[in-house]
Amino acid sequence: MTFRRLGDRPWRDRPQADAIAWIPPKGATPSRWLTVGEWQGRIGAWQQRLLETPNESDGWRLFEPDPVEFSAALVAIWERGDRVVLPADNQPKTLTALHGTGVALGPAEPMLGSDRSKSSPGRAPQWDSRPLPAVAVSLYTSGSSGEPQRLDKRFDQLDAELATQASLWPLAGRLVVSQVSHQHIYGLLFSILRPLCEYSPFATQPCRYPETLYTWLQYCQATGKRMILVSAPPALSRLPEALDWKPASAALETIYSSGAPLSRSASDLVHERLGTPVHEVYGSSETGGIAWRVQQRESAWTALPGVEVSHGDDNRLWLRSRHLEIPDQWQRQADLIALTDRGFELLGRADRIVKIGGKRISLTAMDRALSGLPGVERAQTLTLQRRDLRLAAIVQLSPSEVPHDHRQHRDTVKRLRRALAAHFETPVLPRYWRFVAPWPTNAQGKLGAEIRQRLFLDLEDRRAPRWLGERVHDSGWRVTLEVPEHCAYVDGHFDGQPVLPGIALVHWAMQQARRLFALTSDFDGLERLRFPQPLLPGDRFEMSLEHRRGDGAESLRLECDSRRGKHVSGRIALVDRQKRES
């Protein structure tokens, strides 16, 4: 097995004619290999740029989506004896937060350009006797407080992890294709540093779309290449059934996935379509790799070589690993685990750090950012398990900002997402929004699990209204509701303008009354119930309910009002269930 540690600078003595990267075919332009000599020319170009860029710190902020340019810049900075600072993204707020950590770098000139085969060879790199920096890379990740936390990785830590991976899963010269960002530790290790240390080529472009993956697999299969795929759950869950994967997947050697656990159903589907099991790697930026599994063989996680796992009475994970800053010291983690005879099972996290679309996000930071926006009085985010894990936001707006119809709701969501996009990447922004007024709480004054479930019930039941809160009013209740845009009751009513049928409001009123008044009586008819105007999808309205008994009669007084006026008024006659049965 060919493996060189980063500390030995494997980029220096690799044969110049060796292929370091694969340039995929584009249109009529065939694919070709980028040689080590060409890549070293890019290192020389970056070295020249570093010389021309004033910098009084020991670090360089590097955000470069192109894998070839990124790897060349990385080496050029290390050869100076400087550390690399990797922002997770290039959002303005992210870069502002890293001010003072070093000079920012973008693409060097000349770029490889869209036609890589005609790119400039650059200049010969300068290898001198400067020692490598004490810190190889500094990454930033969300802490439990919501503030970005700096993580320094030494070369010996990176080398330990790279050696572990190479011993378990040697690349053996196969082509590495990545669907994840190398600005994060997983992508950095698997799609950039492992190929450099194991003398394997990597693709010069990220493989962002399943159609691109399909085309590249077809090409590799036709030309006898073997591919290693570095991926994550979001990408693996979007493999179109319409594509005939089986012939092309013969070129696929191994699939790696990290960032979040892959569901068993998704793992089975990937195995079925691509014919290769997924090697999931569990870890974090702080800890490095911890464990791995292939779900078709075992659902439990197996600790990586050199990693020891235990837990305390509270099921919190304790870790001792050569990938940690202090390798011989046990460290307590936020994850909850259960040890088994075959390894350990993950039980969730004890803090508010989650992974959405494979990206790590602090819900505390998201809450703080949302609460600081104009018109927002209070906000809380939570995760919802739909097809995959998604973020939802419960937001209390000032009265003048509350949306009352579909257009206003859409515009409010756009405004809030646009403001949050300065702090967070688009994939982690809340997908589902609930605008409440006032803040809904249970009898203990908390936004408990039952209330959270009620707020998002319409996602699971297309016949349910969108519940947004309730309060006692006089002798009854006022419930704030919305007509969900995809409500089953508006189907077929009508083609030109969908509306909510009046009988659906009667059904919702009975549902709410049974819960609020512990109602046991049954519907027995309508009494002077009028429907002045229909409700439209997206309309926000208040349902007023009053339970009346007297003179042997029982009824439910119902009124529904929105900004557009009254939609229902009248009574629903009720009958005691036992009397009806007798």
Image (cartoon, rainbow, N blue to C red):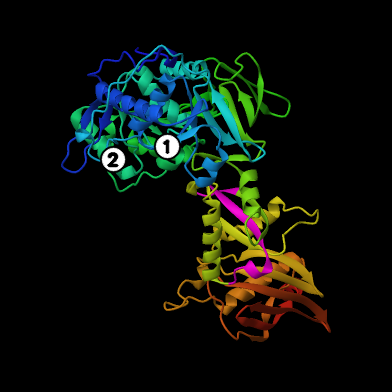
Is any part of residue 401 visible from this angle?
yes
Assign a secondary structure to mark 1: helix
Disc ID at residue 268:
1
- Tell me which segment is drawn in magenta: 383-404
In the image, what residue type sits under mark 1?
Answer: Asp
Q: Is residue 17 above or below residue 229?
A: above
Give yes or no for residue 386 being in the magenta stretch: yes
Residue at 48%, 37% (x, y): give it.
264
| Cα separation between marks 1 and 2 | 19 Å
Look at mark 2 in the image and give the residue it sits on. 214
124 or 306: which is nearer to us? 124
Give the left or right position of residue 200, taking residue 428 as reference: left
Q: Three-letter amino acid code at disc 2? A: Tyr
Identify the residue at image location x=45%, y=31%: 54
| Residue found 80% across the figure and 56% down from its top | 443
Could you tell me residue 557's position as x and y percent? Answer: 73, 79
| Residue 204, horizontal then vertical, whole percent | 30, 33
